[in-house]
Amino acid sequence: MLFMFTNFSETLGTPLKEFFTTDFYEETGARNAVAGIYLNYRMFDTFFEALMLMVSVMEVINVSWISSHSESFELKSPTQSYAGGSEIISKMVGIVYPFVILIGFYMILNGHNSPGGGFQGGTILSTVLITRYLVHPTLDLDLEIIEVIEKIVFMLILIIPILYLFMEIVPVTDLSNELYMIVMNTLIGLKVFCGLTVLFYRFVFYEGVS
């Protein structure tokens, strides 16, 4: 069966690959073929990926221990950090933070020209809060505000491509294509950042004290 499939593939060629990689820069304005695919050709895939992350966050919130004990729950910070109180780790993490943030923003803002994008950049930025919690396990974030921001960003991820790609309310030019890519990668990065932050704090902080 594998031999037959290989011969069949060789006979057919790779028309889909050629379609996506031949003229993607002229059609999408992205120098990165992957960005051109997930922000233009197959934008609906990106819709569902963002939707699945939001559904995961909502499910974690709904089944979370804190949801059914919110009235009797008293917020208490752990008495010891996961770094074991090491000053070396705390100092090193503080030094690394700016570079992690810089890399995250670079991946988001330049994802249409080089490997990267909103998904990768948002994940990198979320590690800042994750490592911060591991060193200083306190909850000084308003998760409800982050959850609201995530929902608003998701709606923008739906609305902007519909208006730009499908309804074409703005003339399609090289400049508008590039601005569209940057805006969409920024929104996706913010969406991923908010989603992973909420997931982490819900699991580690709230469930840890249950």
Image: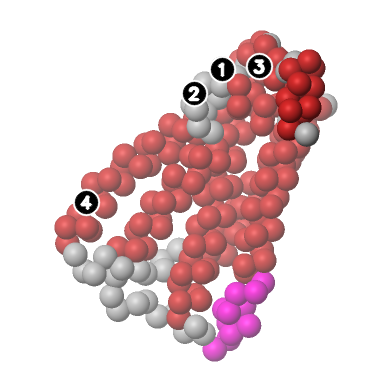
Q: Residues within 10 Å of mark 1 (few under 14, many from 20)?
A: some
Front position among marks 3 and 2: 3
Q: How far apart are marks 2 and 4 (CA)?
A: 29 Å
Q: Disc 4 residue type?
A: Met
Magenta region, residue range: 62-72
Let me know if residue 66 is in the magenta part. Answer: yes
Label 4, label 3: how far apart the Cα atoms are: 42 Å
| Label placed on residue 114 | 2
Q: In the figure, 167 relative to 143: above or below?
A: above
In depth, the one of 103 and 151 nearer the eye is 103
The amino acid type, in three-letter code, at marker 2 is Ser
Q: From mark 1 to mark 3, how far is it between C-alphas?
A: 10 Å
How far across and how far down the image is residue 118, in percent?
Answer: 55, 37
Pointer 3 local density, CA inside 10 Å: few below 14, some 14–19, many at least 20: some
Q: Which mark is residue 39?
A: none
Residue bearing the label numbered 3: 21
Q: Do the residues labelled 2 and 4 touch (CB within 8 Å)?
A: no
Q: Is there CB contact under 8 Å for labels 4 and 3? A: no
Residue 192: give x, y in percent of width and height: 56, 48
- Residue 172 at x, y percent in the picture: 72, 16
The answer to whether the residue labelled 1 contacts the one labelled 3, judged by CB atoms less than 8 Å apart, is no
- Secondary structure under badge 3? helix
Q: Mark 4 points at which residue?
A: 92
Looking at the image, do the residues carrying marks 2 and 1 touch, with CB atoms under 8 Å apart? yes
Give the CA separation, mark 4 to mark 1. Answer: 36 Å
Task: Name the secondary structure under disc 2.
Answer: loop
